[in-house]
Image: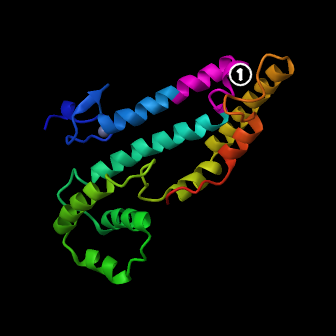
């Protein structure tokens, strides 16, 4: 398959290109990023009008999550673009399945995968990926877990920088409220404080 027919994000030749060089799956998430980024810019330019409307305090997290999902699609596809699969990669995929149906897998199951040849693991990887791709979840489950990602993000310099930017945007919004230029509740009756609390609350995310 020629490279120009592969998705520019996940590099998969399996799915047809939807738009902007991306397959339908990647395009959906890229479009989500673009929409959130545009909303952040609008909220910055007019906090009084858009901060509550777009729940701007949660947008940086949503953008980062969508970026991480695109990265995950690349990871999943890497496992198909090879003739042999190592133990750790297959174990990650099995763990996604185990997490989504909550069984405690016996150690002997993992030993079975260790005993397989890399070529057998590759075939099993393809079978299991087809199942994983059809797990009905709002956000795809990461092979190394959303919990770890949230923790790393929280304690990263980028996370601190985003919190600083978030505080400054929130201050600009409250300045607009004080000047009578902004509503204190959105269309659902939520205030900036309650939205922020919701965005910062520990998420029950798939791990
Ligand atoms: Zn793709």
Who's the residue at 85% across and 17% down the image? 179
**Residue with the most extreme right position:** 178
Relative to 27, say whether 100 is above or below. below
- Residue 32 locus on image (x, y percent): 46, 32
Can you identify the residue that label 1 sits on? Answer: 47
- Residue 120 locus on image (x, y percent): 17, 68
- Residue 39 locus on image (x, y percent): 58, 24
- Residue 41 locus on image (x, y percent): 60, 22
Q: Quadrant of residue 185?
A: top right
Q: Which residues are magenta?
A: 36-56
Q: What secondary structure is found at the residue carrying circle 1? A: helix
* Residue 66 or residue 180, whichever sits in front: 180
**Residue with the most extreme left position:** 1
Q: How many marks?
A: 1
Relative to 81, say whether 108 is above or below. below
190 in magenta: no
48 in magenta: yes
Who's the residue at 68% across and 51% down the image? 201
Who's the residue at 46% across and 45% down the image? 68
* Residue 144 or residue 98, whichever sits in front: 98
**Residue with the most extreme front position:** 188
| The N terminus: image quadrant | top left
* Residue 193 or residue 150, whichever sits in front: 193
Magenta stretch secondary structure, dominant: helix
In this picture the colour scheme is rainbow
Q: Is residue 178 left or right of residue 86?
A: right
Q: Is residue 65 left or right of residue 178?
A: left
Q: Quadrant of residue 100?
A: bottom left
Tell me which image quadrant ligand 1 sits in.
top left
């Amino acid at each position: 398959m020629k490279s120009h027919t592969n998705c520019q994000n996940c590099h998969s030749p399996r799915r047809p290109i939807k738009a902007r060089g991306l397959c339908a799956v990647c395009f959906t998430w890229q479009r989500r990023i673009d929409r959130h980024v545009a909303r952040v810019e609008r909220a910055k330019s007019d906090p009084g009008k858009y901060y509550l409307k777009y729940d701007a305090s949660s947008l940086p997290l949503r953008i980062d999550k969508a970026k991480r999902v695109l990265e995950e699609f690349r990871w999943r596809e890497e496992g198909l673009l090879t003739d042999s699969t190592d133990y750790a990669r297959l174990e990650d995929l099995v763990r996604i399945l185990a997490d989504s149906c909550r069984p405690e897998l016996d150690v002997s199951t993992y030993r079975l995968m260790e005993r397989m040849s890399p070529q057998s693991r590759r075939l099993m990887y393809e079978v299991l990926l087809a199942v994983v791709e059809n797990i009905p979840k709002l956000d795809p489950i990461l092979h190394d877990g959303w919990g770890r990602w949230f923790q790393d993000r929280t304690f990263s310099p980028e996370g601190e920088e985003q919190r600083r930017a978030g505080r400054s945007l929130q201050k600009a919004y409250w300045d607009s409220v004080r000047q009578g230029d902004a509503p204190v509740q959105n269309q659902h009756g939520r205030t900036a404080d309650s939205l922020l609390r919701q965005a910062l609350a520990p998420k029950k995310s798939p791990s």
